[in-house]
Amino acid sequence: MKHFDAPPTGKTVCETTMIVFQITAALRTSTPRRKTGGPMPRHCLTLDLKDDPAAIAEYKRYHIKIWPEIRDSLFHAGVEGMEIYLLGTRMFMIMDVNDRFSLSAKAAADAVNVKVQEWETIMHRFQQQLPQSGTDQWWVPMERVFNLADQ
């Protein structure tokens, strides 16, 4: 059997191979990983925009650079990553959060934050509640029905 020298990192070939496999496996999961290696909680929500091209364009313009107070309220609540996608009028939001995040706690904090309320009032001009929405509910949580990592 041929002997391989340790890679320049000081790790053995076997250790290096295991690291590559761990990195590859982490990249294949559908959920971002914490620095400690565990999965990061994820919330996926949906909402519609009004079927008005000018309103949709204005909504997108607002999201090019959100207000600093809105960004800070998200980070403070434990949101570590957020993306919003749009197809026609249907939006899909992905929120990657830390363990201290709670949808109800975020809603309570937003209710007393003047800048968040101002932002929400503006955004509601462009948004249309889904039939599944509660009376004061805009973004509706979605159910995950598939995860490749579980296969």
Image: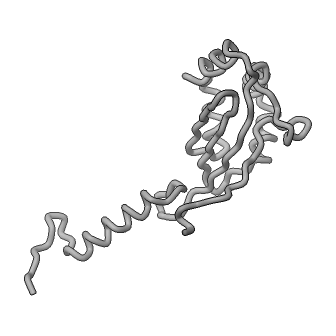
Q: Up-down: is 96 above or below 54?
A: below
Residue closer to the observer: 120 or 92: 92
Q: Up-down: is 7 above or below 47?
A: below
- Residue 114 visible in the current orientation: no
Please provide percent x and percent y for residue 44.
67, 47
Residue 90 picture quarter: top right
Residue at image location 34% in from the left, 68% down from the top: 21
Please provide percent x and percent y for residue 2.
8, 82
Residue 139 picture quarter: top right
- How many marks do you count on the picture? 0
Residue 144 in the figure: left or right of residue 3: right
Residue 125 picture quarter: top right
Name of the residue lying farthest toward the bottom: 1
Residue at image location 68% in from the left, 51% down from the top: 101
Q: Quadrant of the N terminus?
A: bottom left
Residue closer to the observer: 54 or 68: 54
Residue 77 in the figure: left or right of residue 113: left
Please provide percent x and percent y for residue 122.
75, 19
Q: Quadrant of the C terminus?
A: bottom right
Snapshot colouring: one colour
Name of the residue lying farthest toward the top: 54
Residue at image location 74% in from the left, 35% down from the top: 47
Residue at image location 64% in from the left, 57% down from the top: 99
Residue 64 in the figure: left or right of residue 20: right
Residue 104 in the figure: left or right of residue 79: right
